[in-house]
Image (cartoon, coloured by chain):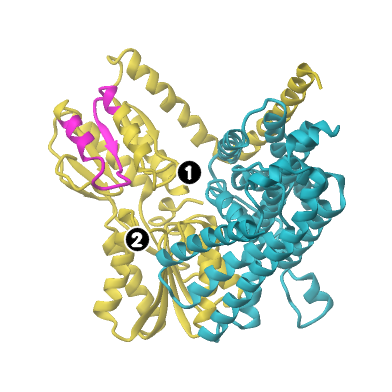
Amino acid sequence: MATQTGETAATSKRSFLRADAAQKLLAFSALIIIFIFFSLASPFFRTPDNVSSILVATAVNGVLALGVTFVIITAGIDLSVGTVMTLSAVMTGVAVTNRGLPIPVGIIVGLLTGTTAGLISGLMIARMKIPPFIATLGMMMIARGLSLVISDVKPIYFNDTPVFREIMMGSVVGALIPGLSVPNAVFILFGAALVAAFILGKTVLGRYAVAIGSNEEATRLSGVNVANWLTAVYALGGAFSGLAGVMIASRLNSAQPALGIGYELEAIAAVVIGGTSLSGGEGTILGTVIGALIISTLTNGLRILSVPQEWQMVITGVIVVLAVYIDIIRRRGK
Amino acid sequence: MKIHKLLFVLMAALVVFAMVAGCAAPAATTDTSSSSATTAPAASGDEAASGDEAAKPYIPVISKGFQHQFWQAVKSGSEQAAADFNVDITFEGPESEAMVDKQYEMLQAAIAKNPAAICFAAVDSQAMIPLLEEAQTKGIPVIGFDSGVDSDIPLATAATDNIAAAALAADKMAELIGESGKVAVLVHDQTSRTGIDRRDGFVNEIEAKYPDIEIVNLDYGGGDQLKSTDLAKAVIQANPDLKGYFGANEGSIIGVLNAVNELGKEGEIVVIGYDSGKQQIDAIKGGVEAGAITQNPVGIGYKCVEAAVKAINGETLDKVIDTGFFWYDATNIDSDEIKPLLYE
């Protein structure tokens, strides 16, 4: 990591491609090993229904983690994703249930709420030079407070709009191909991941995010408006939180204003397990998706085996630390 | 970009937020105007107490939380009592039931104001004892509510007997599944008094009275609806012959209901819950949930303030004020006895 800061944005991008392949392989093999282990340990684990459950359980954390990936690639951090998700869910509830607006409008309100919150965090970080940890910590509290104020500390239900629940738990594929009733949640997750991978790999925003994370000063000197692009990255992260907000509201058929604390750490854990470096400049979307899958597969499998939950926390913690340590060894070896 | 341009952007963003929040709030509160109206005197009561204490006796009510519907119901009960007995109260609690330190500070601040009495529900039954001793030295009567404190200092505690209530849930479960088969239990946490009591109340009753019932899973979902849903789903999938599921608080039971719903197991699993809330009430009316235990949250809030007033007036109090619990299901959910105890 220390050596990387000295490199130019261009060379570090090339090395990021190599590093990325190795880490992806590592995380992917870990996922496969975990999966095989649980499959052997319990016949109930490998049922199609349970695999579908794992994918659905990955959806919300996975989408949050996608947004966090961009932020962490710029060497930043976003602690507000969980409560911004909640705020977006509440705003969607206000639009759909309290205001009676059409569901698509509610979804847009949710996405805009997340994007706005991310934009404000980005401005605080890029323009006011508040460290990301502090700026997003502030946003985390602001979003939490606003969720409670706006909802009057009561869940907002979507009982008048039964279609809303179908966003996550309905199955468009099942309607098209009978017998293959995979919930929409799974496709939303993979769709969002494809969009994220496209933005990271094929757009200027993605390239500048990597460049800023590798060497912010060099990026600035080469004529890039770092402040603007950094702000855009946080806004993008916020948009993913907004999407996660719509998703959790649909899954729970309600906007629960008190939820959200702890979700940011789980999302960060997924990103880190997926091989994205907290010091910035490298990371992949596929890695993040695998990281999120590892966490939910572990949670599900250990539950199926009835392993006491206290141990589940210990095991997840060990895996986070191991993932980062392996990454460090691999880099030292290069 | 110039700094004033940045400020403009920020201000614009904040204004948009404030506008959105501002127009959202009335819509959200139209049906609950009474609760938001009653918070106003409670808030001003704080100033009144520190300003001129001659007016009304001031009683801070320190709860274990404020975000859950349950605590909102306790709050409305204590506000009712404040109006009936002509006292000023404030109602506050930490954001989560794990925040022992935050509650410590709240209690400390409350004692420093020299109130007429304190109503207090401990998040940790031991950690607050030094502060309670301080209150005792200063001659401030302390009334416990909801969960007890491991101390003789509170003159009385207004609470639900959670062990007996969860045992009743276990008896109902046994009755509904024919006294044999597998059941699972989802509890909010393993550290709070209510979590421990409800878990032990249910588990011990099953183990003592129903040898043919096996508890296959005992999990903790933190009261988080999403996590509880995914947990319960895994448990149901691991046990296709599961006959019953007990959720020990509102967040837990919503998770169980979602899981049953998502797996299409409605009616196949006997679901028994705790407390109320709209989702649970709908599930009971719709037949997905067999029934639930309700406490009397409004009663808890009312009785603790009432006891505090009695203590101020020098009356003697019973150590334990049992605020009661009830089993409710589709047959009595709308009855005069149950309906007032439920919150949406």
**Disc 1 versus disc 2: distance between alpha carbons?**
23 Å
Name the spot of residue B326 as percent of width and height, x first.
35, 61
Quarter of the rendering containing residue A31 = bottom right
As for residue B125 lying within the magenta part, the answer is: yes
Q: Mark 1 lies on which chain?
A: B
Q: Residues within 10 Å of mark 2 (few under 14, many from 20)?
A: some
- Dot 2 corresponds to which residue? B326
Left or right of B191, for residue B234: right
Q: Residues within 10 Å of mark 1 (few under 14, many from 20)?
A: many
In the picture shown, does residue A298 fall above or below A274? below
Which shade is chain B? Answer: yellow
Amino acid carrying label 2: it is: Phe
Left or right of B163, for residue A60: right
In the picture shown, does residue B84 fall above or below B162? above
Task: Please tell me whether mark 1 sits on a helix, a strand or a loop.
Answer: loop
- Dot 1 corresponds to which residue? B67
Q: Which of marks 1 and 2 is nearer the N terminus?
A: 1
Give me the residue at 59% from left, 44% from top.
A83
Task: Please tell me whether mark 2 sits on a helix, a strand or a loop.
Answer: strand
> Which quarter of the image is occupied by the C terminus of chain A?
bottom right
User: Is residue B209 visible in the rendered structure shown here?
Assistant: yes
Q: Which chain is cyan?
A: A
Q: What stretch is highlighted in magenta?
A: B110-136
